[in-house]
Structures are given as C-alpha cells and as structure tokens.
Amino acid sequence: MLNSKLKNIIENLPKTAGVYLFWDNKEPIYIGKAINIKDRVKNHFFQPTYKDDLYIKKVSKIGFIETRSEIEALILEASLIKKHQPKFNSVWRDDKNYFYVAITQGERPIAFVTHQKKDTKTQYIGPFTEGNALKKTLKFLRKIFPFYTTTKHPKNNCTWCHLELCPGPNPDLQEYKKNIKKLTLILQGKRKTVLYALKKEMADVSGQNKFEEAMQIRDKISALEQVMSHANVIENKKHQYDNWETTQRILQEILQTKNPISKIECYDISNIQGTLAVASMVVFLNGKPDKNQYKKFRIKMENKPNDIAMLSEVLVRRLAHPEWGYPQVMLIDGGIAQLNIGIKTLRQAQGKAKNDPELKKIKIISIAKGKREILIEGQKQHIPLKSLPREIYNLIVHLDDEAHRFAITYHKKLRKKTLLT
Ligand SMILES: [Zn+2]
C-alpha cells in the first residue's frame, strides 16, 4: 500500500502540463510527461500497468516540473531522459522506439525525425518518446524557423516553399544556419536563450533603422511565444488506435489470416504461491476494451502452483461457453509451453464441437515478456516486440496491461474477503 507521505505528495501535485520524476532515494528511475501531472501520476499508482509494477514499489519520492504547454513538456521530458537515463524508461523502449531530431552539418543543414543515431557527423536531439507529438511540434516550429528536409532543393520554389516552411531555393546561408541553430536550441529546451538572442537582434537592427527587419523579428518572437505556450501536441492516450481498420489489416497480415478480426480476448493468471489463484479474461471489440464482457475465474485446482495447468483449466472453461461469443484471437501470457497448451486445449474444444465455424477461426498468440517477443500459432518464427508495427505493439501492450490490471483487482478483492472470514 502507499505510505502516507507519497499519498500526500500525489494529492498535492498540480493538474497542469509538465514532467514528473519518480525517485528511488537519490536515483531518478522513471521520467514521464503529462497533460495533467496529477492524473497521470495517479494512473501509475492506482491503475498500474505491468511496466509500472516493475518499479512502482521502489518509488520513494516524486518530483515534478510544471510547464506552460505540452510542447514544453515534450521537450523537457526528452532533455531530462537524456540527462538522467532512468532505468525504467527503457524497459519497453529501445532505440527503435525513441525518436530523435537529426540535424545535419555542412552548408545547408537539413532536419528530420529518425529512430536511429547512425551518422557521427549529424547532431541528434532527443530522445523523444512520442513520434506524433514531435512531428507536430516540428511543424509548428518550421513556420517560425523554415528548414530543409532534403539535401537537394529544386531551382524554383518547392511545395514547402509555398507553405512558407522552406527557406527557398537561394537563401542567405548564414542566416539560414542561424535559424537552424535556434531551432536546435529550442528542441534542447533552451527557449530563453533563443528569445534573448532574438530580442537582441531586434534591438540591433532597429538601432540601424532597419525597421522592417525589426518587425519581422518581433513577429518571430511572438509566434514562438505563442507556439511554446499554447500548442497542444501530446496525444491523449485513449485515442491511440482509433483507426481500427488499419490496425486490423496489419494484424491479419501478421497472423496470416483472411478472417476479419473484431474480437480479441486476453488472459492473465494471478496467484500467490498457488493459493487463491485467479485468472482474468478481458475482451477488446474493434480495438477497444468492452468491460461488460470481462470474466473472472477462480482457479479450482488446489495446491498446485502450476501456471500451465492453470492456463489450461481457464481455457477449457472459457471454450465451453459458445454463448459468450468466440473471439478471433486469444492472447495468452507466456512462451512456447503456454502457446502449446493453448493450442492443445483449443484443438480439443474444436474436436468436441465439430461444426462450429467460429471456433475454427480462433488464433492463439502468446506474449513472452521476458524475451520480449510474441509467438503465433502455426508460425515457427518468434517476433520481437520491438519489430512489431506500432499499432500492433500498442494494441498488445494495452491488452496485456488491461488483463493484468483486472486480475490484480480481483485478486486483491478475494484476498481481502479471505482475511475477513
Ligand atoms: Zn522549398
């Protein structure tokens, strides 16, 4: 349970955008950003995902830094992760899941978003945790500091030129480089340095009676202030896979099936030394949790803390309920042993109900969290989680989180009941 000190800290967190840091004594172990710091931190503690469960008990202190906007939170998070390299930020994320802004050197630097830091001559700013938010941020900043995204520019104006996002075919290269420098500083969280420099430039040019230039700089300053304090870029986590059609199509390809996928079930078994073992079944319809269909199972076998047998029991019991409607995908927790027992149980059920076409469509997938890979019925190749398309990765992690959370809640309820009787 949470100690009263932490509870107190959480209660007093601000409900504004910003970055929060979880400390294990003197070591920052997790850094995150939020649109609403208090709500986001509460989620970590009161609706923990299994990722949270890895470290949440170690948290002894919570720090936070409020920002004026989501863009500032995104940038601050990146610079703090770079500085502290917290252990538990990288549990599920390796280089491939982080994003960097690459800025090349040379006469005409270009800027672009990338996963990899492979060129020693290029400067990489990051790591940023959210690609879409980063791209939106760059788009806002590009209006203020136009930049190239490719090395060769056509002789005449390009599409970006017309949108005023490109410096044009023949810019003053020295000015251009200055702009790039400012963009770099902004992305590194040094907004104040940039504003200071701009104000100084403005004073200089108006001192030389170049009022038009001074006005252009003034416009730049106000545009920058505007973007940095108002632009909303962080995605609300709830809408990550709104586009179910795309996700479904990719999932069909991965599972090598032509059957449309609308219903997915995910199972989690929670037990403490085999006593009071419970399992949870969560159901996602078109990519979204359908809580009305969730089921809990109290494992019936006694004194046998055996994961495989428990999984088999749960699947046998579930498959005996055609009236719940069968899913097209069953996601279970574990490696090859769990996958095999899942397949065996499914085949037995299919054998018993020979004419049920819905039962025949079920595909089983297991997620081996230790090895960070998924195993798919009928496919020899294990698929590393990091190589999954983002939509599928998010979906699987969400399913697994949800099943785990639901099992833990049920387990706690049961334990309380047992303690009372
Ligand atoms: Zn152009």
Image: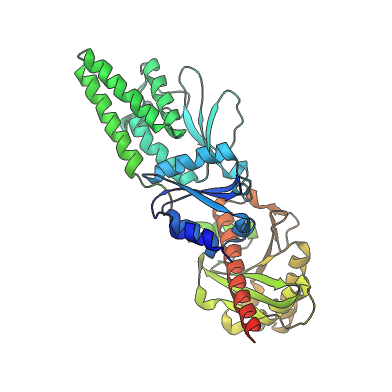
Is residue 146 visible in the rendered structure shown here?
A: no
Q: Quick check: 120 above or below 272?
A: above
Residue 341 locus on image (x, y percent): 76, 71
Front-most of 206 and 310?
206
Residue 196 higher or lower than 189, as above or below: above
The number of numbered badges drawn on the structure is 0
Question: Closer to the camera, 398 or 73?
Answer: 73
For ligand 1, the image quadrant comes to: top left
* Residue 335 shows in the view: yes
- Residue at image position (60%, 45%) is 26
Q: Nearer the viewer, residue 153 or 404?
A: 404
Considering the image in quadrants, where does the C terminus appear? Answer: bottom right
Name the image quarter holding residue 337: bottom right
Q: Position of residue 5 (x, y in %)?
A: 53, 59
To which quarter of the image does residue 141 belong? top left
Q: Residue at x 51, y 37 (%)?
A: 79
Residue that extends furthest to the top in the rendered view of this protein: 208
Q: Is residue 347 left or right of residue 91?
A: right
Q: Is residue 140 above or below residue 316?
A: above
